Image (cartoon, helix red, strand yellow):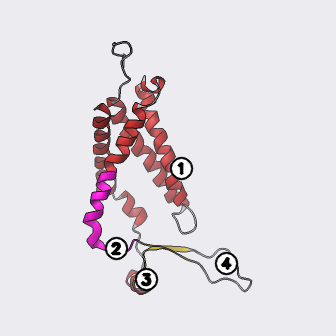
């Protein structure tokens, strides 16, 4: 029961964090929704030519020997296959993930060794380590051709490490080591 309550508290922290950082401060909007000067014209061109969902990479014209020229930009276009009408349905899926990740983290922490569970800082560090794994194997993998610029990928990675650490502060408070020989361990 403590694992579930810890995971739910972590989910609440994640929702509040997201509302403040993304909703009020506009963190992801500044990274993901930059404006183009000729947005209407680009939109109409894409609407006409991008009809199937997917990620499209737009390369410069190859040189005579079939290579892409150095120093020329590569663009990516991501189309999920839906419009604004799907926002409500997708919010339900997103809302579920706000609780699945902290519940999984709380469960993993509850299965950790007694040395990890014996101190509050080590339990928080456990969650921070999950954030580092997310950052390295997810956020930083979005950097590169057709992805985020290096600075944006690093900012997103740092954000996720901080989010997991903040969740860890709450989850670590709830997850306690099992009592040994019927006695309550000191915390």
Vertical side of 117 occupied by 75: above or below: below
Residue 44, x across and y down, in percent: 39, 86
Vertical side of 141 occupied by 52: above or below: below
Q: Residues within 10 Å of mark 1 (few under 14, many from 20)?
A: some
- Dot 3: element: helix
Residue 158, x across and y down, in percent: 47, 49
Residue at the far right: name it. Answer: 65
Give the camera-side residue of 136 and 148. Answer: 136
Labelled pair 4, 2 in contact (Cβ < 8 Å): no
**Is residue 82 rendered magenta in the image?**
yes
* Lower position in the chain sequence, tag 4 or tag 3: 3
Q: Nearer the viewer, mark 4 or mark 2?
A: 2
* Lower position in the chain sequence, tag 1 or tag 4: 4
Residue highlighted by disc 4: 68
Residue 24, x across and y down, in percent: 29, 56
- Dot 2: element: loop
Residue highlighted by disc 1: 136
Residue highlighted by disc 2: 82
Residue drawn at x 40%, y 86% is 41
Residue highlighted by disc 3: 46
Residue 163, x across and y down, in percent: 39, 45
Q: CA distance from mark 1 to mark 3?
A: 32 Å
* Lower position in the chain sequence, tag 4 or tag 2: 4
Q: CA distance from mark 1 to mark 4?
A: 29 Å
Residues in magenta? 80-97
């Amino acid at each position: 029961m403590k694992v579930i309550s810890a995971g739910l508290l972590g989910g609440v922290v994640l929702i509040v964090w997201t509302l403040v950082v993304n909703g009020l401060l506009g963190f992801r909007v500044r990274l993901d929704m930059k404006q183009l000067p000729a947005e209407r014209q680009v939109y109409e061109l894409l609407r006409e030519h991008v009809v199937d969902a997917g990620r499209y990479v737009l390369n410069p014209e190859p040189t005579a020997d079939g290579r892409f020229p150095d120093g020329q930009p590569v663009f990516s276009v991501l189309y999920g296959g839906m419009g604004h009408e799907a926002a409500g349905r997708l919010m339900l899926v997103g809302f579920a993930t706000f609780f699945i990740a902290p519940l999984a983290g709380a469960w993993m922490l509850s299965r950790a060794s007694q040395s990890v569970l014996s101190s509050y800082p080590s339990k928080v560090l456990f969650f921070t380590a999950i954030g580092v794994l997310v950052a390295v194997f997810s956020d930083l993998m979005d950097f590169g051709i057709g992805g985020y610029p290096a600075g944006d990928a690093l900012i997103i990675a740092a954000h996720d490490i901080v989010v997991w650490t903040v969740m860890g502060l709450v989850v670590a408070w709830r997850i306690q080591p099992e009592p040994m020989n019927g006695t309550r361990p000191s915390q």
